Amino acid sequence: MKKTLIATSIASAVSLSALTLPSVASAEVSANIGVVSNYLFRGVTQTQDSAAVQGGLDYAHESGLYAGTWASTVDFGDDTSYEIDLYAGYGGSVGDLSYDVGYVYYAYPDAPSDIDFGELYGSLTYSYLTAGLAYTVNGQADDGPFTEGDLYYYAGVDVPFGESGYTGSLYYGYYTFDDDGDAGYGDMDYGHWTASVAKDAGDFGSFTMSFEMADVDDTNYVSTDDDLQVWVGWSKSF
């Protein structure tokens, strides 16, 4: 049911051009809006294969500290209609190695049951390569997926195609759930891969086409959809 990418989705999140605020020394505030034909989180649709409208607001300080919020429409087949993510973290570099650590809270204010959860995350990037993990430290659900102890880890590569404005990406992620096979939920652990190409169109925003597939079977509690998913999206940062 749940949710793509702090990892790539924080997450699919989009890097933004920034508006400098003179009243806050060396700090930047930026915003983004976008639309996707299908919102996938770690290989699983959050909109029942329908489109989603998304947007966010970010604050970054020269020290490496940052905070932000991001929202999207969702459709879980019940009354849940939107998701709000709140996050804060710290990023920096040591030589050619970049790092990022932080916390993100996924909230679903109009969900009929408590399904909010929070994760600690970290990643390392060297050249075109990135690897990271996210560990669920708190969840509102008593058992099942998205509770304390769940772990998601991934590795990927992002390669710019010269000065064309195109970037190709490929990554693989694996989700392990603390309650896998317990409490009558059956298998929940699964892996998934993503291959995408993005085009930076300058003032016209950024366009993305992505191909995703989850390695699940008919008994998986989280998702039974192992078909190739293809989605397109547009985003614009300010």
Image: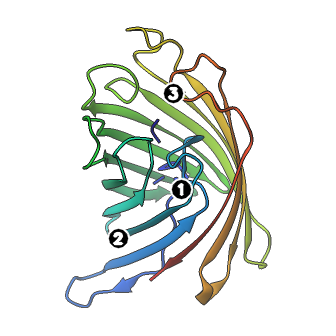
Residue 12's tag is: 1
- Dot 1 or dot 3: first in sequence order is 1
Q: Position of residue 72 (x, y in %)?
A: 42, 59
> Callout 2, which amino acid?
Leu
* Kind of element beneath mark 1: loop
Q: Position of residue 135 (x, y in %)?
A: 39, 33
Q: Is residue 188 above or below residue 122?
A: above
Q: CA distance from mark 2 to mark 3?
A: 30 Å
Query: 104 or 98, which is in the foreground?
Result: 104
Q: Is residue 127 above or below residue 173?
A: below
Q: Position of residue 228 (x, y in %)?
A: 74, 41
- Dot 2 or dot 3: first in sequence order is 2
- Dot 2 or dot 1: first in sequence order is 1
Local packing at callout 1 (Cα closer than 10 Å; few below 14, some 14-19, many 20+) is: some
- Residue receiving disc 2: 57
Q: Quadrant of the C terminus?
A: bottom left
Residue at figure coordinates x 55%, y 45% from the top left: 48
Local packing at callout 2 (Cα closer than 10 Å; few below 14, some 14-19, many 20+) is: some
